[in-house]
Image: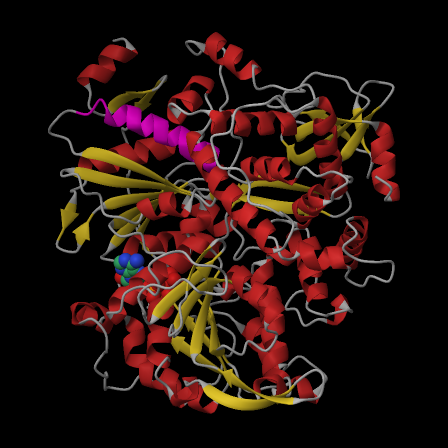
Amino acid sequence: MSKKRKHESNPNIIKVGDKILSLEGYLTKTKKPRHDEPAPSQDASPGPDSAAGPPQPAQTDAQKPKGSTPKPSGDPAFFSTRQALPIWKYQDDIRRVLQKTDVVVLVGETGSGKSTQVPQFLYQEKWCRRRTVKVTNADGRDEEVAVGGMIAITQPRRVAATTLAHRVSKEAGTPLAGTSRGNEKGNSGGTKGLVGYSVRFDHRVPKGTRIKYMTEGMLLQELLRDPHLRQYSAIVVDEIHERSIDVDLLSGFLKQIVTGDKKGRGGVPLKVVVMSATANVDKIRNFFSGADSEHEEARTPVEFLQIEGRQFPVEIVHTPKPVPDIQEAMLKTIFKLHTEQPLSDKHGKHDILAFLTGQEEIESAQRLIEEYAGTLASNVPKIRVLPLFGQLSMEAQHEAFQPVKAPFTRKVVLATNIAETSVTVPGVRYVVDCGKSKVRQFRARLGMESLLAKPISKSSAIQRAGRAGREGPGKCYRLYTEESYDTLLQPTDLPEILRTDVTGAILTMKARGIDDVMSFPLMDRPDVESVGKALIHLHMLQALDDKAVITEIGRKMVLFPVTAPYARVLLAAADPKHDCLLEVIDIVSIITSGEDVFMQIRSEEEGHEDVEVLRKELWRREGDLITYLTTMQRYTSENADRARWCKERRIKLRNMRQALNIRKQLRALCERHGLLKEPAPADPQPFVPTSPERAEQIVRCFLRGFALKTALLAPDLSYVTSAGKHVVAIHPSSVLHGQKKEAIMFLEHVYTQKNYAKKVSVVQAEWVAQAFEGTL
Ligand SMILES: Nc1ncnc2c1ncn2[C@@H]1O[C@H](COP(=O)(O)OP(=O)(O)OP(=O)(O)O)[C@@H](O)[C@H]1O
């Protein structure tokens, strides 16, 4: 029987795109289905339930749950759900411990209710009231200031901060603070509410907010303005086990505040609650308590609380054999679940959340699933696919959290690891985990950073599985074998500070007045080589002077929510010598809007010649950066149908919309900090091609930020990097692919079969020399 005929007669064989997939044998359970296991410890030692485990932290009275469960405040519609959370019966203990101690480490399994309930337990505490106190100014004068009143809960990601704020404001029965987006100072106006949030480019924190969800990065920004965190009575550091650079820096600053003299807060202590889903938090505990420090003054009492239990079980199903093609296995699992499992039960919907590695993989899977969904018989439920990745606009990210309104339809959310921790995607009862994620890794010796798909850690796998058991019992299908889980996956991920470029982290420390970065309190210290490279890099960017002291340029750089090199490029473009800030903002906006804005065109695709002709109109000989600029300018000058304009050129509309969003925010920031003297002209503006002279100025500005990412043409016609002397090839996605120029600048690298340069521009060897000498 031909494949096609077989497909037609056998419901277990389906055709998607050019693939014929057999669903036979899919979703077969492993012999002993294992339930979601406890989180692995950071040092891979046995967990708390293990008889052979390490000595557990001394049980405090607070660890024994009391029988009484106080009446909740807030919206009665949520009472029973909240009371059913494992953390509910610990609330008195949490309050009691914090009345006595300033620092508490709280461990609870995913779904126990930490992120949503802890701030609600605490905000009415006596110590959480706003007080007026006397402090002595830097110039020696006494003044009265207000201290406290608010609790901040930090999250590693924007989507977690905003969705938690929405949820908690509903539970508390008060509208989300502010009805419109405000500025960073929180003057968003609107309705007064208990809960607010603050994430990059989006703030809803009017006066009166008591509970504020925010990203770690936003709190770091606030620390630059208010080193004593005077607005807050408590900081709840959530998901500390993720160990982002930002949370490590934040922990260092918090430790300094809690062990310091508190004079800047008029003697009012700052309470710190550190929360983790990882069982072994000895390192974190010792760090805050100073138990590992020789200095008596660095010690502070730290209490420990463990919340036992989780709300719903999650059954784990591994593949019996390794899968040769992850995308195929992913599609098969989703299709099989869709066709065989009910749409809902008494707990609610049965939606699917699948974890993939990145935007590219998500978009390709979305296309294939939608194509498949279009072929379903009318008696099979429909599918609504929703992507969820970091570079999507907040509006698009929030769509994945809405229930699907259409009847007889299942939601399938395709996410990167941004949906891994903290979030509850309503409706989800099945998780499909591909077992990988893209990880940024810095090789200090080469001075290069790469983004590669790597196996996740056990801790991540458990977090992913946990997303299936938030509203009812769930199932997690892992597209890897149980043996791989047991033997190949590391217990936890390496902290980000040990694997990525620390340039931004060091600049933040310097901007906060920390001169000796090596003595700053950190849970893990990057090696001297990485710190040395970062200092040299910051010096090249003119963010530090010869004595490694932060410069005016460095201080301005930290005001921008982009990496240090991009911040430097923006400042260079604002310099009257170059005067091309609007153009540079356009380019930076496109680059930071997501993965490549141009879709790949395959030569066998129908109509690919027409697409290529239209695309060539955007191409510029100066390289990818000026091509991006032309793309943005043509797109914004398009008055009729921007969606069609993108479709005809196979340009990602989603990226372009997000780029416009970023452009608006960057323009506003530049205006606020005096870099843009007058507002940018409104769209649409007629398209005027950028002159070669202006293009040169723009490329030179980028060279101020990216001199280390340049390569010169060697006699054998290969490109050799100026720093490190490594061979790089121009990536096939670049408009300069295959061309030989005297010198190139590239903004990114990828390592696949070769060491590839991406986002490439033509430069002159002389400019590169000038950039290194600081005379450009
Ligand atoms: N946006 C939401 N929509 C619906 N239910 C939610 C939402 N947020 C939280 N919940 C409910 O509250 C429960 C507890 O969530 P919470 O985030 O407080 O747990 P957690 O212990 O912090 O878990 P994690 O460590 O995974 O973040 C969830 O399991 C879910 O039932």
Vertical position of residue 146 compared to residue 500: above or below: below
* Horizontal and vertical percent position of residue 387: 37, 39
Residue at image point 23% right, 24% down: 374
Residue 365 located within the stretch drawn in magenta? yes
Q: Which residues are magenta?
A: 358-376
Prevailing secondary structure of the magenta residues: helix
> Along the horizontal axis of the image, is 268 left or right of 554?
left
Quarter of the figure with residue 376: top left
Q: Nearer the viewer, residue 283 or 687?
A: 687
Residue 280 located within the stretch drawn in magenta? no
Which quadrant would the C terminus be assigned to in this image?
A: top right
Residue at image point 76% right, 55% down: 543
> Along the horizontal axis of the image, is 17 left or right of 294?
left
Residue at image point 64% right, 78% down: 256
Q: Nearer the viewer, residue 19 or 422?
A: 422
Q: Is residue 755 visible?
A: no
View extreme (front): residue = 678
